Image: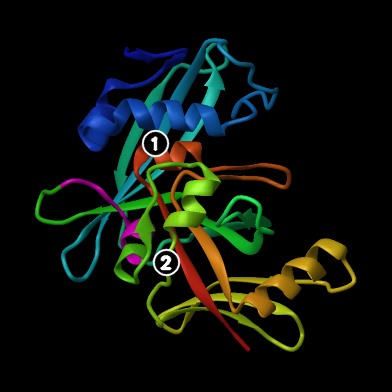
Amino acid sequence: MPVTRNVAWDGRLESFKGRDATHYVTTAAAIATTCAVCRRPLQPDEPLSLSVDIIESTAPDGTEYVTFVDYVCHRQCSEPGLTVRRAPWKPADLTPLAARMLLTQQPDPGNPGIVVPVLAYTLVPVVAFREHDGELTSALVSILLSHGFQLAMNPDYTDVLDQATEVAGSCSLTVTGGNLVTLNIDGETVYAEQLDPAEPDDAEWLEQATGEGSVLVIGGDNLVITETVLDVDAAASLGTLVIGKVTVRF
């Protein structure tokens, strides 16, 4: 039973994740906040265990898809484990998570900064695919990269702002007259959120997004998004953080 830092895990995971197995283990533990069994908070450095459910399926074009669902527990609550099963292929039942914020870009010292509206976006669970016995590849990251997004290896927001460029025209962020915000890729809506201009945070973000004409989208796998937290460190270290400026349309 391998143990990475304070997390015990099933060694069979390495046959699926390869050299990224230990990163996957530490990322899962970093993201988790409560025990999957007893639901009590997880404390730093206490003994933990990781269980992973893996679902394999084959798409009609022959591409092998692998879905990972992980559970982090106190070690006293559960031993590490791994289950693998095959299932008929179907479009993954994914849950989008998003957070909005405003960042300030300072092009030159002494000059007033530029306010940049940001939408952070991810999907859970993580879905990966393998072609011709190659490495596992993130489905979400692959899609975003194919539309002009870039990998961001540094989670520092200053570097992210400096690096981000415009993505392909097939991606857009639409704001309707009713303040419905949708993120669209190839004509498909991948995220939608109804904003309330009576709420100061919503109103300020809408004003900046519509005035600026573009929104910085920070996406990919392994983003930690809650009502109070946005953490992209794990995504950057695992090479699953992508960024791009998306045009706002009305």
Please indicate whether residue 245 sits to the left or right of residue 114 in the image: left
**Identity of the residue furthest to the front in this view:** 110
The C terminus lies in quadrant: bottom right
Say whether residue 219 is visible: no
Indicate which disc residue 165 carries: 2
x and y percent of residue 214 in the render? 56, 74
Say whether residue 24 is visible: yes
Three-letter code for the amino acid on which mark 1 is drawn: Ser
The N terminus lies in quadrant: top left
| Quadrant assignment, res 207 | bottom right
User: What stretch of residues is rendered in magenta?
Assistant: 135-143
In the rendered image, the vertical position of residue 49 relative to residue 220, given as above or below: above
Name the residue nearer the viewer: 114 or 250: 114
Q: Is residue 136 magenta?
A: yes
Indicate which disc residue 237 carries: 1
Residue occupying image coordinates x 70% and y 79%: 180
